[in-house]
């Protein structure tokens, strides 16, 4: 029994990774009906952007441009995380406007294939610009070993899982009790009904793409160490 509990606690890190990416995927799917296979690419962008900022550089993933530009030093964890999430949100908005907004009336399979295309293109651009060896990132959470009798587990696994649970609860409360959350649920049920009620499904979907991309970016940041 102790051995099973040991592996259960050690699996919190990997489970938290999947849970964080699932949150981003669900936010986007509920608002636009896109099963976004590029969620991992958004997380990768957030992780790389954060890692480069911690080295005092701003990442550029467009081939033909410099790999990064100097920003004058490490801005610290919170500033780097906020900037990275903001850039992920901007990337999510761009993807929605250029790729998925024109496909709003397309069959679900077409939107899914488009998201796979985005994933492949982004992976290729990242590899072409940065290679396959990512930069090293310092630990975000404490890495001390916690002991519960015969059970030993790294502290960062537990804190990472707890952070994802807290994020899930915040998102659930926001989408359940706020006006924006109610509007998102209404638009996902019926676009025509949303239009009649004075809502704009297009703007709601754009906002949710930004939120979903920012959540994916946060997942990448937390995973990056």
Image (spheres, grey):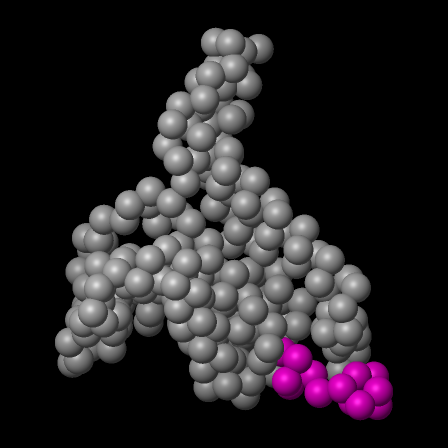
Q: Is residue 191 magenta?
A: no
Q: Position of residue 23 (x, y in %)?
A: 58, 56
Residue 56 visible in the displayed image: yes
Q: Position of residue 212 (x, y in %)?
A: 55, 66
Q: Quadrant of the C terminus?
A: top left
Q: Quadrant of residue 124?
A: bottom left
- Magenta segment range? 193-205
Q: Is residue 17 above or below residue 198?
A: above
Q: Residue at x 71, y 87 (%)?
A: 200
Q: Is residue 223 left or right of residue 36?
A: left
Q: How many marks?
A: 0
Q: Quadrant of residue 53?
A: bottom left
Q: Position of residue 24 (x, y in %)?
A: 55, 60
Q: Is residue 71 left or right of residue 118?
A: left
Q: Is residue 53 left or right of residue 181?
A: left
Q: Quadrant of residue 175?
A: bottom right
Residue 37 visible in the displayed image: no
Q: Residue at x 49, y 79 (%)?
A: 93
The majority secondary structure of the magenta stretch comes to helix
Q: Residue at x 66, y 55 (%)?
A: 170
> Of 8 and 107, which appears nearest the observer?
8
Q: Residue at x 53, y 40 (%)?
A: 161
Q: Is residue 201 above or below residue 143?
A: below
Q: Is residue 79 above or below residue 13?
A: below
Q: Quadrant of the N terminus?
A: top right
Q: Position of residue 21 (x, y in %)?
A: 51, 54
Q: Is residue 33 left or right of residue 12?
A: right
């Amino acid at each position: 029994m102790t051995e099973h509990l040991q592996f259960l606690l050690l699996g919190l890190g990997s489970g938290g990774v999947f849970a964080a990416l699932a949150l981003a995927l669900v936010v986007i799917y509920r608002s636009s009906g896109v099963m976004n296979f590029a969620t991992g690419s958004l997380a990768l962008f957030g992780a790389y952007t954060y890692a480069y900022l911690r080295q005092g550089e701003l990442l550029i993933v467009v081939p033909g441009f410099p790999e990064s530009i100097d920003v004058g030093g490490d801005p610290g964890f919170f500033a780097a995380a906020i900037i990275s999430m903001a850039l992920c949100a901007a990337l999510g908005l761009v993807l929605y406007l250029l790729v998925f907004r024109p496909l709003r009336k397309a069959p679900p399979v077409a939107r899914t294939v488009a998201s796979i295309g985005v994933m492949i293109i982004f992976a290729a651009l990242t590899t072409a610009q940065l290679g396959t060896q990512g930069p090293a990132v310092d630990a975000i959470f404490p890495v001390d070993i916690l002991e519960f009798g015969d059970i030993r587990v790294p502290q960062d696994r537990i804190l990472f899982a707890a952070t994802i649970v807290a994020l899930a609860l915040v998102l659930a409360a926001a989408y359940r009790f706020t006006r924006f959350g109610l509007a998102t649920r209404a638009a996902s049920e019926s676009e025509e009904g949303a239009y009649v009620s004075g809502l704009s499904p297009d703007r709601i979907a754009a906002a949710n793409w930004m939120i979903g991309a920012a959540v994916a970016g946060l997942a990448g940041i937390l995973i990056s160490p």
